[in-house]
């Protein structure tokens, strides 16, 4: 079979049920997953960009690498801040198997990771979802979480209200009970949510510990460098904390680095990650003391393991 080049139906090749299960399954395997490469790229007259290189492989099976270009200044140009591509090869011969749109791989697997975290860490009776952010990732996170929890109400907040309005209309068009949160009413929205998912490029905390009620699950997606944060120190102190990939998160996200440096939490405060959750070494919210009252935080920095799971699923869907 010849190599597959950026199929137009990539999203359809990654349905939520199969993708969430693929992520849960892949963390039970022995995968080579080097720490990602971070490189700052200077951009004239605007914020510096970040180049990320994310390889992973399963010996004798599949080898993949994703290049991610993060340009925060693109928001001023009306362009996406993140672009990427993914190359999947045979780990037995090195032959190229497929090239996929890395933006779709990233958005789908990131959303699936949020949904998997909600499956493990949110209350089963969660009904109210607050989505902070209205970009490409957020547009995937909402339907992914709806696939694992019986959500009745979705609220959307974004730093650009017009983006939130557009997202709300898209959700309403497919039958979701969605409303926009007024720009200055984020605190009130956090207080009434059962699940809060945050997918932004913020460098300052957006979700404050004083706002978060008992039993809430907080899903932090956006902070993937040491200078980026979506949650304040108080929230991290109050919460039971998990990550997608603990070792990477400890070195990559300001949501962990800053509170650890300030002595608010320690590395041991991160109770588990997808490896321990998927292998049943930690069994999520129900294993916590007073599980219905706990605030849980899931911090995603993105893992090349997740990319590889998504790419191999898409490749095998085409082959089937």
Image (cartoon, rainbow, N blue to C red):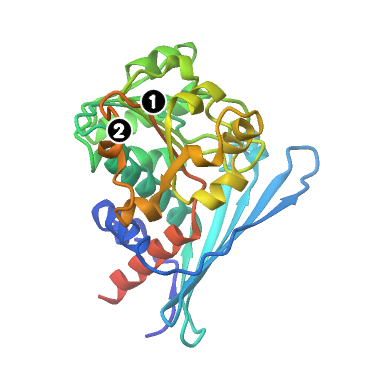
Up/down of 262 relative to 286, above or below: above
In this orientation, does residue 38 appear? Answer: yes
> Which residue is the extreme one toward the bottom?
93
> Tag on residue 210?
none
Q: Nearer the viewer, residue 82 or 302?
A: 302
Q: Residue at x 52, y 46 (%)?
A: 301
Q: Which quarter of the figure is the C terminus placed in?
A: bottom left
Q: Quadrant of residue 177?
A: top left
Do the residues bearing badges 1 and 2 touch, measured as CB atoms within 8 Å? yes
**What percent of the width, then of the height, locates residue 261?**
66, 33
Helix, strand or loop for disc 2: helix
Find disc 2 in the rendering and name its residue. Answer: 171
Q: Going by the image, does 270 lie left or right of 215?
A: right
Residue 244 x/y as whole percent = 44, 48
Residue 294, compared with residue 304, is above or below; it is: above
Distance from Cα at disc 1 to Cα at disc 2: 10 Å
């Amino acid at each position: 079979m010849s190599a597959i080049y950026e199929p137009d139906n990539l999203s359809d090749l990654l349905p939520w049920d199969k993708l969430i299960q693929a992520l849960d399954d892949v963390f039970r395997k022995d995968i080579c997953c080097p720490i990602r490469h971070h490189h700052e790229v200077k951009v004239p007259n605007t914020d510096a960009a970040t180049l990320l290189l994310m390889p992973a492989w399963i010996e004798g099976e599949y080898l993949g690498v994703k290049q991610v270009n993060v340009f925060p200044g693109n928001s001023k140009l009306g362009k996406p801040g993140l672009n990427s591509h993914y190359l999947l090869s045979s780990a037995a011969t090195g032959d190229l198997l497929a090239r996929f749109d890395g933006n779709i791989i990233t958005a789908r697997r990131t959303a699936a990771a949020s949904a998997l975290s909600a499956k493990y860490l949110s209350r089963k009776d969660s009904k109210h979802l607050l989505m902070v952010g209205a970009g490409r990732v957020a547009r995937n996170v909402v339907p992914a979480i709806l696939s694992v929890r019986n959500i009745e109400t979705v609220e959307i907040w974004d730093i650009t209200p017009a983006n939130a309005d557009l997202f709300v209309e898209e959700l309403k068009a497919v039958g979701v009970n969605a409303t926009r949160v007024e720009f200055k009413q984020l605190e009130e929205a956090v207080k009434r949510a059962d699940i809060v998912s945050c997918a932004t490029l913020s460098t300052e905390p957006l979700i404050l510990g004083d706002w978060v009620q008992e039993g809430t699950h907080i899903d932090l997606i956006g902070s993937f460098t040491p200078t980026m944060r979506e949650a304040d120190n108080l929230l991290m102190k109050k919460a039971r904390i998990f990550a997608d990939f603990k070792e990477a998160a400890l070195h990559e996200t300001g949501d962990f680095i800053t509170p650890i440096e300030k002595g608010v939490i320690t590395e041991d405060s991160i109770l588990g990650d997808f490896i321990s959750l998927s292998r049943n070494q930690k069994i999520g919210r129900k294993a916590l003391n007073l599980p219905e009252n706990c605030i849980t935080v899931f911090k995603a920095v993105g893992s090349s393991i997740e990319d590889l799971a998504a790419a191999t699923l898409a490749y095998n869907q085409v082959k089937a």
